[in-house]
Amino acid sequence: MTIATRITASEFPTLGETHPLAAQIDATQENIAAYYRRFVGLDGVVLHQDEHVEWFTSRLGPAGSHVGRFSADEDIDVAIDQVITDMSAQVRGWDWPVYRTCRPHDLGERLLRKGGKAGHVAWLLADLDTLSTEAPPNGFSVRAVDSAEMMAEWWRVYAAGFEMTLEVCKIYHDAYAQHLPRIDNNAVHLIGYHNDEPVTSSTLLVAGGIAGIYDVSTPPAYRGRGFGSAITVATLTLARRKGEQHVCCMASEMGVPIYARLGFNTHVDIPEYRWE
């Protein structure tokens, strides 16, 4: 399979309410916001929400800091300057994605004039009914994290897969572990095993009317054996069992062909502006 539809960062601002992908793209925005709200409560994490803007900052590890929502109809430049001031006071580097729902429509141009460095973040979309059902490698199984011990195991696999130290990515362990004591069917963390050896990880988050896939990670020693694809298929299958129709995931350029093979057929480049 290949990517059938690609919406570039330059095309993205022109998407209107009647575009066939508008609802999925807006749901993706909500899913991303819900994902980062799971980190709230940790030291070093700040979430600001008001009528016009939502932004998230983290001084811990690689979680990232970004603006999740912005809308202003008057005193627009004053409102933009306030966000830039507030974000820059929290962290040195942060991003401002310009989603379809952001206002004004020329927000990207305004951010560029104010010093933002233009780029984009790539998200892939798909219909869960058309995704791959390929068989996993022999000896492969998947288990959902349901205890502190399994959360620690998930953390070790995740860190090794992204080639980070445990300390650097501790924020993920601590954020997810704080939700374990209560029933939380919207987020599920998975570990893939090969002959009972943990070899890959993922996270499924159902929020905003779409299923989001995060944290797919396979340590270098286990790559090239189909484990990452297998846990992705397992995560997609779980989303389908939960009754979801659509799925989104962030993908690197290296990951796009893998996801395309599994049935992701829409590539959306969301404009994003960087401050350092």
Image (cartoon, rainbow, N blue to C red):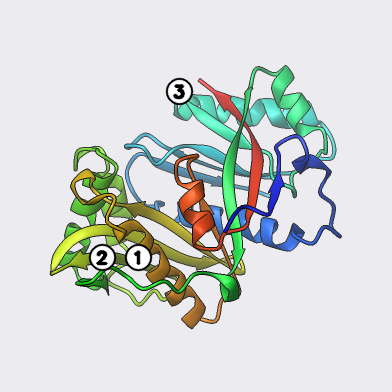
As measured in the structure, the alpha-carbon distance from the residue carrying label 2 to the one carrying label 3 is 36 Å
Please say if 202 is above or below 65.
below
Instruction: Rate crowding at label 3 as few (under 14), some (14 to 19) or many (20 or more) other CA atoms within 10 Å.
Output: few
Q: Which mark is residue 248?
A: none
Mark carried by residue 192: 2
Quarter assignment of residue 170: top left
Residue at 56% x, 30% y: name it: 86
Helix, strand or loop for disc 2 = strand
Disc number lying in front (3 or 1)? 1
- The quadrant of the image that shows the N terminus is bottom right
Q: According to the image, label 3 marks what residue?
A: 92
- Name the residue type under label 1: Ala
Depth check, mark 2 against mark 3: the one in front is 2
Where residue 152 sits, quadrant-wise, is bottom left
Residue 204, image x, y percentages = 42, 65
Q: Residue at x 41, y 76 (%)?
A: 185
- State left or right for residue 11 relative to residue 61: right
Q: Which residue is mark 1?
A: 230
Task: Measuring from the top left, give residue 234's x and y in whole percent.
Answer: 38, 71
Q: Are marks 2 and 1 in contact (CB under 8 Å)?
A: yes
- Name which residue type carries label 3: Arg
